[in-house]
């Protein structure tokens, strides 16, 4: 199917892009990788009157650590995260997720920030951003705005990002000593969205868990921050099988999946329990330097 007709601009600065968005009214859309926007336009699920293509804006492709944060610019593609040595060495949860998003063609175009901005509860990056406590830096007509990834989605395909704001960068705190993270995803077939997925980040002091965060993908209308499951781990040993099981049970209780072609709700809820345990074990091993 063909999309309905639209105007197109490709500004070369963030300021110009913000002005174009504001001039385009509420239904103008930013385009980054186009890997969600264009399919939605072809299916007529979205019919923006104006596309603001940000691909010609210099400086949005930053992928580096500075000032204690990993900076992921708006034009950093899934594939760049998958191939980055920095990510491979320091952010295993990001590598885990990047390797299982869609297929290589989509990974070469789609962006981390575009995925988060899209507000799809099936998006893998919003869960990773939640588990890692990411800050989402946006720019709008009134200047810079920082959103927290944890409560960024407000409903399905809706976020706190204003229609006139551009997400320019995600910033993720650099790993602390004793930190480990992992992303576990079950997909019906290669290249599909998750039937369920779980992202975990923990910090260990010796064997004791001192910090924890758990995010859930595609098991509810929003990306889920399983805060009770994470809180239940604080002060527990990473070797405490009962504590790990309990966190899995609480994460499953926080999920709210629907039965669909990826499986019945009960199956997905149990997947959350099992994947939480697996992710915690892998994150624990990584925190102790036992596993890449
Ligand atoms: C067949 C298929 C399989 C897929 N499988 C997966 C999967 O397994 N896991 C997964 O997570 N994703 C999957 N995706 C989605 C893919 O990851 C997209 O790349 C991603 O969701 C959107 O990123 P994008 O850069 O392509 O954004 P675009 O398509 O350009 O934009 C998506 C939305 O976000 C907005 N937007 C984009 N960038 C910005 C910005 N910087 N500031 C403000 N608004 C912005 C756009 O206006 C639009 O509303 C799949 C897509 C397809 C087509």
Image (cartoon, grey):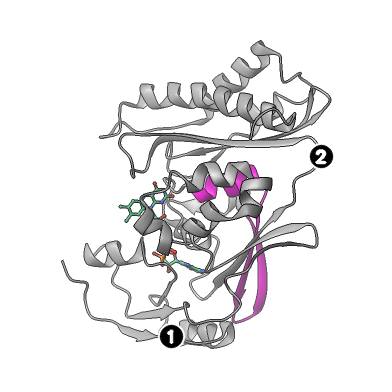
Quickly name the residue at label 1. Answer: 10
Residue 139 appears in the picture as rendered: yes
Residue 239: numbered disc: none
The residue positioned 46% from the left and 57% from the top of the image is: 158
Q: Determine if the magenta segment contains residue 127.
A: yes
Question: Furthest-right residue in view?
Answer: 205
Q: Secondary structure at mark 1?
A: loop
**In terms of sequence position, does the residue under pointer 2 or pointer 1 come before the other?**
1
Q: Position of residue 273 (x, y in %)?
A: 51, 22
Image position of 230 (left or right of 4): right
**Picture quarter with the C terminus:** top right
The picture quadrant where one finds residue 142 is bottom right
Q: CA distance from mark 2 to mark 1?
A: 43 Å
Q: Position of residue 33 (x, y in %)?
A: 41, 67
Residue 63's place in the image compared with 241, above or below, is below
Bounds of the magenta segment: 125-148
Q: Determine if the magenta segment contains residue 137.
A: yes
């Amino acid at each position: 199917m063909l999309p309905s007709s639209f105007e197109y601009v490709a500004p070369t600065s963030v300021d110009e892009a913000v002005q174009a968005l504001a001039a385009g009214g509420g239904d103008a859309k930013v385009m980054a990788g186009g890997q969600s926007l264009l399919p939605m336009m072809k299916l007529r699920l979205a019919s923006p009157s104006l596309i603001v293509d940000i691909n010609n804006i210099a400086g949005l492709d930053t992928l580096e650590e500075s000032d204690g944060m990993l900076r992921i610019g708006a034009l950093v593609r899934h594939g760049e995260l998958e191939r980055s040595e920095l990510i491979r060495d320091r952010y295993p949860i990001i590598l885990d997720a990047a390797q299982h998003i869609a297929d290589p063609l989509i990974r070469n175009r789609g962006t981390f920030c575009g995925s988060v901005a899209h507000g799809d509860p099936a998006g893998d990056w919003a869960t990773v951003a939640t588990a890692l406590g990411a800050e989402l830096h946006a720019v709008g007509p009134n200047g810079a705005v920082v959103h927290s990834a944890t409560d960024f989605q407000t409903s399905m395909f809706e976020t706190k990002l204003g229609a006139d704001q551009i997400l320019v960068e995600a910033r993720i705190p650099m790993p602390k000593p004793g930190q480990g993270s992992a992303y576990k995803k079950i997909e019906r077939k290669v290249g599909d969205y998750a039937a369920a997925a779980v992202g975990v980040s923990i910090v260990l002091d010796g064997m004791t868990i001192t910090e924890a965060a758990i995010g859930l993908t595609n098991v509810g209308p929003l990306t889920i921050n399983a805060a009770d499951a994470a809180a239940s781990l604080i002060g527990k040993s990473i070797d405490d099988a009962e504590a790990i099981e309990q966190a899995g049970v609480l994460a499953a209780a926080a999920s709210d999946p629907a039965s669909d072609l990826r499986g019945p709700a009960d199956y997905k809820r149990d997947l959350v329990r099992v994947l939480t345990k697996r992710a915690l074990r892998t994150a624990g091993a990584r925190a102790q330097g036992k596993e890449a």
